[in-house]
Image (cartoon, rainbow, N blue to C red):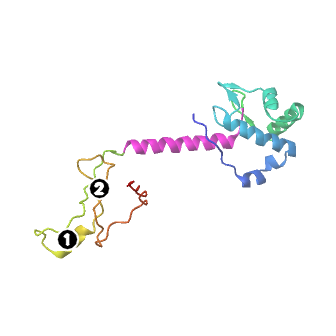
Amino acid sequence: MGKLPAFLFYPGDWLTDANLRRCSTNARAVWMDMLCLMWQCEVRGVLSTDGEPWTDDEIATAVPGDTYQNMLALQELLRNRVAKRNESGAVFSKRIVEDEQLRCKWRDDKKRRRGNVHHDVHLNVRALSSPSSSSSSSSSSSSAAAAPSALSSSSSPLTTTTPSTAPSGKPPAASHPAPPKKKKKP
């Protein structure tokens, strides 16, 4: 799984979660460090490595500060149901696990939708051209002049061709300024 640089933080949840508010300041600080560690784990939101849950001592050691105080804070977080344990005994964050499941579902749905789209689509748009003598009316020639640029039928679907002049008769505006021309030495 690729490393994402950040996770969603919900200030409203942090400030209003009754279980978290019952915890000491030290326990809340330990919880924030644990959330960051959980984000970096291979199963996002779960403190485990290669499927093995971290022990309470490993968690207390991984969090900066006094290991004994961190162990007390971890016990407080578990007792107040802020931190939870899964069936294998690993400590996890319910919110990060749920957010990750939603993110994966969204990603899979997006991949599935992309798989249903035919990528080799050729547009049938006429290139701008001057009206021919065979056009039946001036309104049809003006609508042809207002058509957007077209894809060249012999080029790849990503290559576009543009007319040499815009419908107004003026050259089209460049999207990027041309680099300055070098002067030849005499």
Residue 143, above or below 112:
below
- Residue 30 showing in the rendered view: yes
Which structural element holds mark 2?
loop
In the picture, residue 26 is in which quadrant? top right
Q: Residue at x 67, y 44 (%)?
A: 95
| Residue segment shown in magenta | 91-116
Where does the image place residue 114, in percent across and percent down from the top left? 41, 44
Where does the image place residue 122, in percent across and percent down from the top left? 28, 50
Q: CA distance from mark 1 to mark 2?
A: 20 Å
Which structural element holds mark 1?
helix
Question: Is 8 left or right of 161, judged from the image as shown?
Answer: right
Name the quadrant of the C terminus.
bottom left
Question: Is 35 left or right of 130, judged from the image as shown?
Answer: right
- Residue 81 showing in the rendered view: no
Where does the image place residue 123, in percent across and percent down from the top left? 28, 54
Whichever of labels 1 and 2 marks the residue nearer the N terminus, that label is 1
Where does the image place residue 39, in percent across and percent down from the top left? 67, 38
Q: Residue at x 41, y 58 (%)?
A: 178
Main SS of the magenta part reads: helix
Q: Which of the numbered marks, if any, corresponds to residue 161?
A: 2
Q: Residue at x 75, y 38 (%)?
A: 34
**Front one among 70 and 151:** 151
In the picture, residue 177 is in which quadrant? bottom left
Going by the numbered disc 2, the residue's amino acid type is Thr
Going by the numbered disc 1, the residue's amino acid type is Ser
Question: Is 117 left or right of 142, judged from the image as shown?
Answer: right
- Foreground tag (1 vs 2): 2
> Is 97 colored magenta in this rendering?
yes
- Residue for badge 1: 141
Furthest toward the front, the residue is 186
